Image (spheres, rainbow, N blue to C red):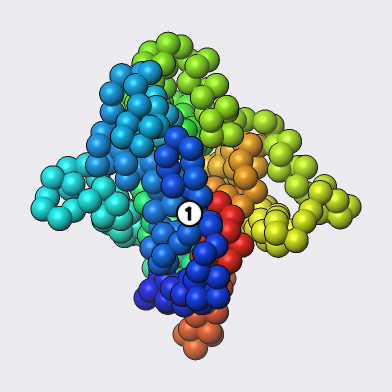
């Protein structure tokens, strides 16, 4: 219900923005020239940016040989930059009558979000209580950039895999944790945070002589998916250097040790490097990061160390990678472990107060989902 509320607000904002300025161009069309186009409905935000690539791969596969181009004039090799698990899950659905690549991806996201919420509930219940589990899933549903949970993005799928992996770690089910972490490595490169958490937890268990051979198996299974796909894509492209160069030169994504994030923070603090178009999103993104860091500090004091390690690694990857600052909310979404702090606080609240707080957060989440793409025109 919270996501429905947010989507309704997003729909109203999208309709308003289109009525006020129907010719405004806010999305790249995905061709080799990357021409920008106008939006037509609120669904555009759910299938824009990375979602266009995933839906294309879901419908047409990874494509032809390196050096060739597809019908839009885009080199096939660029599809190798997008990890394949999400479009692989969507591709079988495209063989059904009337199911396009976009529809297939949205279906996968829908069920992935349900699996993620279920996993979050399981973690919250294990760590604190049944009510805290419900609140953890609810808070995640209304987090900033939660619109990507419903769009053709990998956030819901990766969150589901991460949640169930961490739950398996908390229950010391090493083979399940290793297997799920290995699968997550096929979903996105930031799965490194989850893989590292599983590896560290397994190493601690082995050092304490707990679990027998299973922690060692988890150490082997966890990085398998990520290493396998990077090796495959690198072989197709002619080397691992070519793989990372394409990420950097074409999509502007690389590890810069937080330089770009720190640049935005310092620009805001001293009031330089801003213009009227990007100033609001820069401020909001920095405030989001600051909020997550505060919640992390509180989690580190009392939360299970496995959740703390995963949250820390996810935050480091989000803040330390070069990307447009408007994507910060989406990149922080998998750091759901820090949301355990407000979830436990809400679990102690009265039902009437919960309705007010969660309802307000749902409205704010929907506002952000509509404002970010349709009014600010920034990347998701």
Would you call the spot at circle 1 few (<14 residues within 10 Å), some (14-19), or many (20 or more)?
A: few
Secondary element under disc 1, as helix, strand or loop, is: strand
| Residue extending farthest front | 23
Placement of 291 over or under 225, stated as above or below? below
| Residue extending farthest bottom | 352
Quadrant of the frame with the N terminus: bottom left
| Residue extending farthest right | 270
Q: Residue at x 81, y 49 (%)?
A: 273
Placement of 341 over or under 99, stated as above or below? below
Q: Residue at x 42, y 76 (%)?
A: 8
Q: Residue at x 48, y 59 (%)?
A: 38
Q: Which residue is mark 1?
A: 37
Placement of 60 over or under 4, stated as above or below? above
Residue 300 image point, x, y percent: 63, 50
Observer able to see residue 373: yes
Q: Is residue 157 left or right of residue 19?
A: left
| Residue extending farthest top | 238
Q: Residue at x 50, y 76 (%)?
A: 19
Q: Relative to the observer, which residue lies in front, 77 or 353?
A: 77
Q: Relative to the observer, which residue lies in front, 339 or 362?
A: 362
Q: Is residue 29 left or right of residue 312?
A: left
Q: Relative to the observer, which residue lies in front, 209 or 24?
A: 24
Residue 332 image point, x, y percent: 56, 50
């Amino acid at each position: 219900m919270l996501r429905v509320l947010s989507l309704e607000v997003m729909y109203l904002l999208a309709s308003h923005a289109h009525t006020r300025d129907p010719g405004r161009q806010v999305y790249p069309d995905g061709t080799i020239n990357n021409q920008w186009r106008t939006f037509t409905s609120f669904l555009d935000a759910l299938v824009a940016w990375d979602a266009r690539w995933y839906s294309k791969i879901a419908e047409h596969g990874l494509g032809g040989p390196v050096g060739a181009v597809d019908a839009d004039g885009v080199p096939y090799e660029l599809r190798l930059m997008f990890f394949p698990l999400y479009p692989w899950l969507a591709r079988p659905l495209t063989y059904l009558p009337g199911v396009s690549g976009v529809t297939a991806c949205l279906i996968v996201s829908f069920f992935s979000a349900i699996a993620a919420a279920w996993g979050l509930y399981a973690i919250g219940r294990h760590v604190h209580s049944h009510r805290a589990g419900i609140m953890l899933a609810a808070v995640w549903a209304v987090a900033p950039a939660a619109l990507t949970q419903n769009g053709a993005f990998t956030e819901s799928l990766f969150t589901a895999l991460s949640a169930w992996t961490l739950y398996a770690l908390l229950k010391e089910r090493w083979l399940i944790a290793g297997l799920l972490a290995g699968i997550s490595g096929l979903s996105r490169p930031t799965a490194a945070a989850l893989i590292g958490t599983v590896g560290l937890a397994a190493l601690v268990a082995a050092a304490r002589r707990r679990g027998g051979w299973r922690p060692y198996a988890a150490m082997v299974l966890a990085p398998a998916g990520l290493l396998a796909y990077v090796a495959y894509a690198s072989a197709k492209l002619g080397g691992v250097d070519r793989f990372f160069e394409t990420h950097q030169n074409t999509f502007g994504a690389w590890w810069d040790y937080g330089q770009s994030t720190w640049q935005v923070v310092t620009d805001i603090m001293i009031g330089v490097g801003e213009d009227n178009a990007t100033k609001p999103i820069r401020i909001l993104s920095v405030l989001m990061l600051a909020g997550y860091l505060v919640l992390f500090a509180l989690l580190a004091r009392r939360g299970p160390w496995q959740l703390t390690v995963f949250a820390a690694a996810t935050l480091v990857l989000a803040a330390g990678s070069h990307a447009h600052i408007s994507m910060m909310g989406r990149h922080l979404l998998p750091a759901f472990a820090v949301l355990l702090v407000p979830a436990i606080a809400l679990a102690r609240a009265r039902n009437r107060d919960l309705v007010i707080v969660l309802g307000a957060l749902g409205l704010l989440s929907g506002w952000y989902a509509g404002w970010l793409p349709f009014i600010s025109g920034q990347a998701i």
